[in-house]
Image (cartoon, rainbow, N blue to C red):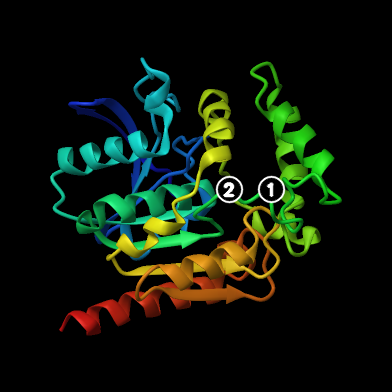
Amino acid sequence: MNSWDRILLNTSRGTFEIFVKGEGEPLCVTHHYSEFNETGDYFAETFTNSHKVYLVNLREAGKSEKATEHFQLSMLESIFDLEEIRESLKFEKWGFAGHSTGGMLGIIYGIYFSNSLLFNVIVGSAAREYMTFSENCIYNSQHPQFERMQDLTIKLQRSDLSIENRKELTVERTKLSLFNSARYQELFNLNIHKKISGTRMNYFNREVQIYDVTRKLVLISTPTIIMCGKYDVQCPLEYSLELNEQIPNSKLIVFNRSNHYPFLEEANMFKKEFNLFLKEQIISSL
């Protein structure tokens, strides 16, 4: 697998670290608190055969700009940063794809800047805080795996972890979100590794408590495909159903043998549905 090309992009809102791979129309991929590097990202890798993917480290992640004010770590400010990145790259429009909290950013992006997006891909995500009212969510205290997930997440934020310990904890944490945990080695078989930005995650853990943009979903006008595993324990399926109900002309695909990673657990179907979505957009624009 080829590594990703690294660029440091200077913008009026600061310098951002971006990893680039693929050919075709531009597609932005990011996550709210992941730190990417030249090894890339499993979700982003999904799109490199059809698009030129720009994998963005947000503020306080990797070598990207630091935050001088706490509010700069918010979802909305992160979208302002992405818009500045798009303009600095001189793209009139680009696509966006986000998984999990990356999908939340995609939702905000669509609400405020649909005119900047060719299309929007939202995978395993939600338009509101998803823990309090769903016992299907692993972050809900009533979920049987709640305590273990909390323990692993906290440990992974430590800066003094050895590479081996971090890998072991990451594997265990990821297995909690697979339809069939025995498939872990088969699914995650590439030399891809990334970290968590503790600063960004800590801010997100506060912001998500008041996160609810459900009444603004009607403002999304860009073509949107929503994809979710039937057994997603992080952002349960009911939240994707809600997105589909509220986002005009959106399309929902449910993966019946997936948890939180349908782009790996049912990779062929995922790519097929994404490509079909793109063809439908081309036909509708004729």
Q: Is residue 90 left or right of residue 167?
A: left
* Residue at point 44%, 51% (across, down): 213
Of all residues shown, which one is farthest toward the front? 215
Mark 2 is surrounded, within 10 Å at the Cα level, by few (under 14), some (14 to 19) or many (20 or more) other residues, namely some
Question: Which residue matches tag 2?
Answer: 129
Residue 85: image quadrant is: top left
Q: Is residue 276 left or right of residue 266?
A: left
* Residue at point 37%, 64% (across, down): 49
Question: Which residue matches tag 1?
Answer: 132
From mark 2 to mark 1, how far is it between C-alphas? Answer: 7 Å
Q: Secondary structure at mark 2?
A: loop
Image coordinates for residue 194, horizontal then vertical, percent: 55, 36
Tag 2: residue type? Glu
As displayed, is residue 88 above or below residue 236?
Answer: above
Say whether marks 2 and 1 touch (CB < 8 Å).
Answer: yes
As displayed, is residue 136 above or below residue 86?
Answer: below
Tag 1: residue type? Thr
